[in-house]
Structures are given as C-alpha cells and as structure tokens.
Image (tube, rainbow, N blue to C red):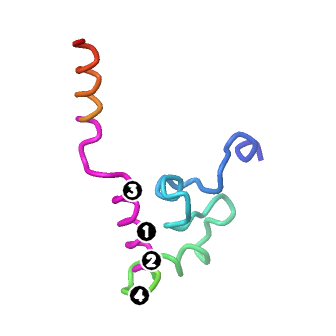
Amino acid sequence: WIARLLVRGDHIAMANILAERRIVPEFIQHEATVDNILPEALALIEDGPRRDAVLAGYQRLRERLGEAGASQKAAEAVLSVAQR
C-alpha cells in the first residue's frame, strides 16, 4: 500500500518502464504464484507468439535506446565540458 503511494507509473520492470508499455510480465506480491508464473514462463520458453512478442518488444526497446556505449559517451561529454 505504501509503495503504491510512493511509486508512480503502471510498471515496475525496467524494460516495461523504459518501453512505456508491457513487454515482460510483472508478478507483484500475491500475484507471484506458481499458478501465475509457470504458464508465462512456459510460453516464453517455447517458440510461439508470446515469445515472439517479448523479443520484438526488446528489439524496439534496443532501437529506442540507441547504440551501446552510453557510459563512454557520457564520460566523454563530461570531460569535454570540463576541459573548456
């Protein structure tokens, strides 16, 4: 209850937060049961539409985030500013 007051947004998984939509399942508190998790896990393991949807979501997220090396680029930008 307290966390719901403090946390704003519809998602808690980092991939879902960054994508601003549900890419991966989220099982919170009482929802984290074998009966809920097992079918989703099996659907992700098997080649099928659910797995394809998750992989496509991750691909769109990669494209949205851009190329790797964000830490290096940030460090270079900070050094550039500091050297001025």
Dot 2 or dot 4, earlier in sequence: 4
Dot 3 or dot 4, earlier in sequence: 4
Contact? badges 2 and 1 (CB < 8 Å) = yes
Between label 1 and label 4, give the one nearer the viewer.
Answer: 1
Chain part drawn in magenta = 51-72
For label 1, the residue is 57
Q: Which mark is residue 64?
A: 3
Contact? badges 2 and 4 (CB < 8 Å) = no
Q: Is mark 2 on a helix, strand or loop?
A: helix
* x and y, in percent, of residue 3 in the image: 70, 44
Q: Residue 64 appears in which quarter of the rendering?
A: bottom left
Cα separation, mark 2 vs mark 4, equals 9 Å
Between label 1 and label 3, give the one nearer the viewer.
Answer: 3
Q: Is mark 3 on a helix, strand or loop?
A: helix
Between label 2 and label 4, give the one nearer the viewer.
Answer: 2
Contact? badges 3 and 2 (CB < 8 Å) = no
Locate residue 38 relative to residue 53 in the image: left or right.
right
Total labels drawn = 4
Q: What element carries label 1?
A: helix
| Nearer-the-camera pick, 27 or 34 | 27
Q: Which mark is residue 41?
A: none
Cα separation, mark 2 vs mark 1, equals 6 Å
**Residue at horizontal 38 percent and vertical 85 percent from the top:** 46
For label 2, the residue is 53
Cα separation, mark 3 vs mark 4, equals 24 Å
Locate residue 3 relative to residue 75 in the image: left or right.
right
**Residue at horizontal 52 percent and vertical 55 percent from the top:** 13
Quadrant where the C terminus lies?
A: top left
